[in-house]
Each structure stands twice: as C-alpha cells, then as structure tokens.
Image (cartoon, grey):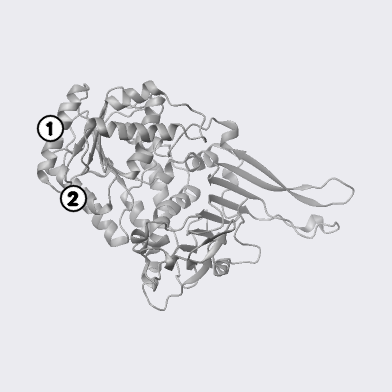
Amino acid sequence: MHQEIEHEVIPHGAQAPSCAMVIFGGGGDLTKRLLMPAIYNLARIDLLPEKFVLIAVDRLELTDESYRLHIKEAITTFANDKHYSQKLDQKKLDQLLKSIYYLKGDFSDPQFYKQLDKTLKTQSLNHQILSNTLFYLAVGARFFGTIVDELGRADLLKEEAGYWRRVIVEKPFGNNVESAKELNQQLRRNLQEKQIYRMDHFLGKETVQNIMMMRFSNAIFEPLWNRDHIDHVQITVSETVGVEKRANFYEATGALRDMVPNHIFQLLALTAMEPPPSFTADLIRNEKTKVLNSVHRINPVTDSIRAQYTVGQRDGVDFKGYKSEEGVSAESKTETYVAMKLCIDNWRWAGVPFYLRTGKGLKQRYSEIAIQFKTPPLSIFKNTNVSTLNPNMLVIKLQPEEGASLTFGAKIPGPKVEIGQVHMDFHYKDYFQNAPSTGYETLVYDCMIGDATLFQRSDSVIAGWEIVRPLLNYWTESAAPLAYYPVGSDGPVDADQLFVSSSQGWRKSS
C-alpha cells in the first residue's frame, strides 16, 4: 500500500484544481448522454479546472477529431433540450473540445497502460498540468478489478506530495455481501479508501442533497424528526418503463439488487441519520452507516413482497408482460417490483416503521420520501362535527419535479366546525433557475475537489447488502412466493399487507 498523502481542501464553489481525467468506456452511452454534458456544464459555470485534459479510452476505431465531433453532437443535443433555459455556450464548448483526446485500447492488455501513461504525460505537459489525475470507470463491473490492477502495475495510482490520484467506480458495487467484499478487496490492493469514489448518480439530485439541509438548517423540522412525532416513513421510487432492452442485465439482477442497497438505502440513511458533529464527508458518512447498521433484521416472509409485471395498459396503450420481454425466460422468477418494511433499532426511531418500494411498469414515474406525522388527540373536538383528524404529511419530491409539499388541517370557512386538508407545495423551478443538469455535475466536481460526502464508503456498501441478505437467501428457494401486477397499476395489492395499522397505507402520487 502506498504512503498516505494529505491534500489541500478545496472549498465548494471554487474552481477545481488542474487535473487530467481518463474515462474508461469513453465511447459508451453513459459517457455520451451524461458524463460529457456534465463536464460541459462545469466548464460553462467556470468550475472545471482552468488547466484540464480529458482522455477517453475505448475499443472503438476513432481519432481525436472524430471523437470530438461525436461529443460535440451529444452536448449540443443536450443543451438544446426544450426543458432547459440555458442556451449552448459555443465558446466554452469549443474550449472544452480542444482538451479532449481519444485513445483506443484493450483494458486487459498490460501494454496498453504503458501507452496510456505516455499519452497522459504528453497531454498533461501540453496543457501545463502537473500530476492530479482522475480515472472514471464507466464500464461494466467485471472490468473494475482488472483496470485498477493494471493501473497499479503501471504505477498510475501512486500519489505524491501535493498531487492526487482518484478513481470513480460506477455501480453496481457487487451483487451480494460476498461479491461486494471481494470487489472492495480488489480495489484496495492498489488504492486507499480515500482514493475510491463509488458513484451513485441518484445522490447528485439537488433534492437528495437538500434532505440534510431541510432537516438540519430548519428548526421547525428537526425537533419533530423522531418517534415521538412521526408515525411512519415511506420511500418510493416508481418507474413507468419496463426492462426494455436490458433483459440480460435485469434477469441476473432484479429490482432488489438494482435499486435497494444503493439508491433507496441512501435515501433511508439521509432521512434517518443523526446530526453529524460537522458537515464533513467522513462524519456524515459515519452517521449514514450507523443507520444502516441499526436496521433490524428483516423477516423475508412477513416484511417483504416481490412481484413481477404482467400484460397491462397505460394511457390507453397495451404493454406486454415481463415474461414476454426479449431475452426473458418464460419461467423467470425475477422480481420487477419489491416492497419491504423495516425498523431502525435506535432511540430516535424505535417503533417507527419505514416502508420502501420500487418497481418498473407502474402507473406513474416519481420518487419521493413521505413522512407521516402522528395525529393529535381528538378530545378537544368531541362536541363538534369533527370525527377524524387526517395526519400531517411532509413529502420530499425527488423526481420528475424536485421540491417538497406539506399537508395539514385547517378550518373550512362557515358556521360549522369542519376541517379540510391544505397542501403547500414548493417546486425548485419556481424559486431557482432550472439550469440543464444530468445529476453528474456535482459528483464529478466533488471528486475533483476531494469531497467524498455524496459517495458511498465501503462499510456503507457492505451494510446495505447485509440488510437484504435474508431476502436474497429466501428468494432463491423455490417456495418463495412471487406476486404479480399489471403494467400501468400501482403495483401488487399484496404490498398493502406490510402496513402495521389501518391508519397507514401507500401514498398515492400527486
């Protein structure tokens, strides 16, 4: 293991320090649709380093010029999207394109890394860059260990005083506890933990980052954020799309592995974590990991539902079922929907159920965190027309529109004492400019300045897989039940069985 080096802390909002960036999988869809537009956006708002070079690596037969044309088209298409108010900044784009190079190579060939080392040194010198280097692994998980091993053998990961070497790894981070541990061991052969940035683009969304801001900067929320005032919490990630052309991936993965240990558990951790001593990466990640380690062991029989979509309709259009998708076995037991109930064994949350669900082929596309508060005593209204009180609910909306809403009771005007429900809605777009974003801007920038707050640490990854281990083990048994739901529905009716009282139920999307 290399000697640990301390690096300068760059404040948020400052331009990132000069660096070279290498993207493995530079010819892929992720790079074209998300990474390159994100890098352009950083350049447009002057957060990309002034001295910067990017080397895209892939197996395609491309030249520097043909690759630049490919990227120019992708960024232009992104910037011209009708949903965004920003026009293409041609000057910034032209400057960025001049710093981009392409290198064809085989990721498993040791000789290629010698060529990469030479290209890095040459282009870094041409762009007056010293030794900061960011490696982005936008490739299949099967290549992660090989690439990092070869980078290590080529001495490309060694840090020297004042200069850093960092590696961004895209999910999935394994597919169970054992494979996640094995992947971590592979990476740690050549990297320190602080050099590894495990990417989950979901955490780049503004509203996800705002969960901590809402909780810890507003005194109206934090005093109520506990078991004395909260009845239960629901976290939903609902998708309308099916598996489309990803059946080979999805058959081996399923909804649980694809969404729960990463996206949904990170939302759970941000919602339930204790206030950190200060707003620094490791202290925040310590608190998030404590939450995951405090989750009570799930009973897969009583606390979970798995289901698969069947033929159905949405908006008058017919859709086929999962088993009819190309590449899916007619006997498939792969879940496209999962819901679970879990509890957190600590003083803040003891006795408060958390309900989580995610699925494909559903009625609406949305992601949200809904916090339902307990109802006050009814006694003072006993001589009025008020027979029931509806609970207050705070909903943090992540997509498609980012914002938050609060539901509370108010008297309906008139001589009778009647209570109606009031909805207060906050939308980001109404208060802040809706600049074009892929969700990767913040994460790439944070890696460049060395802020790991929004990236998963290895202990958090392992803790997430430990939570779902009982479900994965149970679902491999032939007798484990699989429910069904039609495309265009809200999911299987069996999911309603998870709720512990009649006053609880899945929130309908607004």
Q: Give above or below for 438 relative to 48.
A: below
Say if residue 1 shows up in the picture.
no
Q: Give above or below for 289 relative to 338.
A: above
Residue 395 left/right relative to 281: right
Q: Position of residue 61 (x, y in %)?
A: 20, 40
Q: Which residue is mark 1?
A: 118
- The disc label shown at residue 146, or none: 2
Residue 175 is drawn in which quadrant?
bottom left
Q: Residue furthest right?
A: 415
Towards the viewer: 271 or 338 = 338
- The disc label shown at residue 32, or none: none
Q: Earlier in the sequence, mark 1 or mark 2?
A: 1
User: Label 2: how many residues lie within 10 Å, few (<14), some (14-19) or many (20+)?
Assistant: some
Q: Secondary structure at mark 2?
A: helix
User: Which residue type does callout 1 highlight?
Assistant: Lys
Q: Secondary structure at mark 1?
A: helix
Residue 36 left/right relative to 274: left
Towards the viewer: 114 or 266 = 114
User: Which residue type does callout 2 highlight?
Assistant: Thr
Which residue corresponds to the image point at 53% horizontal and 67% vertical from the top-left?
485
Residue 280 left/right relative to 500: left
Residue 247 is drawn in which quadrant?
bottom left
